[in-house]
Image (cartoon, rainbow, N blue to C red):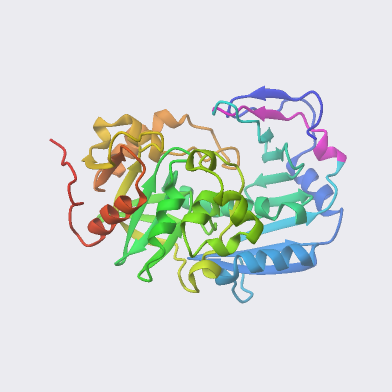
Amino acid sequence: MPPSGLSTTSLRSVTVTESVPSLAALEREARGVQAAAHQLHLRFLDELVRVDSNSSQLVAELADYFSEFCAPPAPPTISVTALDAPVPSALAELPYSVVVRTEPGKRAKEAFVDLDQGRVIHKVRTDMVFLCGPSTNLAIGPAVQNVNQIVNFINTRLLDRQLDAGGLLGHCSAVLVNGRALVFAGVPGAGKSTLALELMRRDDVQFLSNDRVTFHPHASGVDVVGVPKHPRINPGTALANDKLRRVMSTDDIARFSAMSRDELWPLEHKYDALIDRCFGPGRFVLKAPVAAVFVLAWSHRDLASSARCRRISLAEDPAALAAIMKSPGPFRLGPMVPLASQEPEYRTKLAPVPVYRIDGAVDFAAGCDWALSVARGEEPAGSEQPS
């Protein structure tokens, strides 16, 4: 459980002025708990990541998860230490502030404290603690029980590099077709991953990202860089895709098949769908030029109308722009800039990219058809053009 006496805060930088240990001292204490004798080397585009851990089991599970990105030993550009060990009292007793969730009904996930040299983040549901600084990337706590949080921590370090290089963070999934990326944005639960995975049934489609991308404008267009995070899917997505059913047990297939779509849609029951296991090896890529962005504004409750696709201007559709944008959260060091203040930058830098809004009833087959039309260099059949 989180330490007692936590204060609450929106996601803003709160630097501690009272006497607390330095980040370097806290790191030394954490590293002194157990030696990190096991290593894993990974390559993601130009980033070479070395993971050091005291747990051979954790390293084995990470190697399995990142199997297509494992690499021979080389000098790393990013070093991460992940310790499966008790959290030292000096870390547990820091004066954390809880990050208040903006989504109604959502519980707090993180608490953090800023130090002069970096930040310490406490995952309040799992008791994992993360130390982040210019040269510090350390996780400590019940790591073997929370491998997914170590995966996420590695990915936040990769995202940091992309944001440092001028990238804009997007709350999007993406696939690659004909050498170009089809990017899908939307609020949580809109079906971004489901639509991407529907397209993955085709052998000529590759997976680029599940939930986060960074956009990188350049002289001839915009590139998108994905995150090496496999989809975590709900039962409805798994049941609807024959390539994904293998992640479910026979009992789960029977249990969830008996539920209606309205019952399945809000379920918070997740399965890890590893791309290479479900769709075959060599299907996960991390960078491509953007063909188009599709904003999923449809609703599974809209049964009266068909799905509609129309091309839009982000300058005239603030809701669509908001669906694309994403705050990096507490793992991003430096000043926490309000997301709304970045809207002009997103509009300007994404201006070369065709953007389509899909609304009406949820229709993944139609969504696939419209996306594939754009991949062929055509306008989606029946789509409306901006006036």
Near-viewer residue (293 or 10): 293
> Residue pushed farthest left?
387
Residue 130 x, y percent position in the rendering: 71, 45
Residue 71 x, y percent position in the rendering: 59, 74
Q: Magenta includes 258?
A: no
Residue 185 x, y percent position in the rendering: 39, 44
Q: Residue at x 49, y 65 (%)?
A: 243
| Quarter the N terminus occupies | top right
Q: Quadrant of residue 66?
A: bottom right
- Left/right placement of residue 361 relative to residue 30 reads left
Near-viewer residue (170 or 216): 170
Q: Residue at x 43, y 48 (%)?
A: 192
- Left/right placement of residue 45 relative to residue 40 reads left
Residue 68, placed above or below residue 328: below
Near-viewer residue (325 or 145): 145
| Quarter the C terminus occupies | top left
Q: Quadrant of residue 75?
A: bottom right
Near-viewer residue (63 or 207): 207
- Left/right placement of residue 327 relative to residue 73 reads left
Q: Does residue 165 appear anywhere in the picture?
A: no
Q: Does residue 265 appear anywhere in the picture?
A: yes
Residue 97, placed above or below residue 232: above
Q: Magenta includes 95?
A: yes
Q: Which region shows up in magenta? A: 89-102
Residue 2 x, y percent position in the rendering: 78, 33
For the image, the number of numbered tags is 0
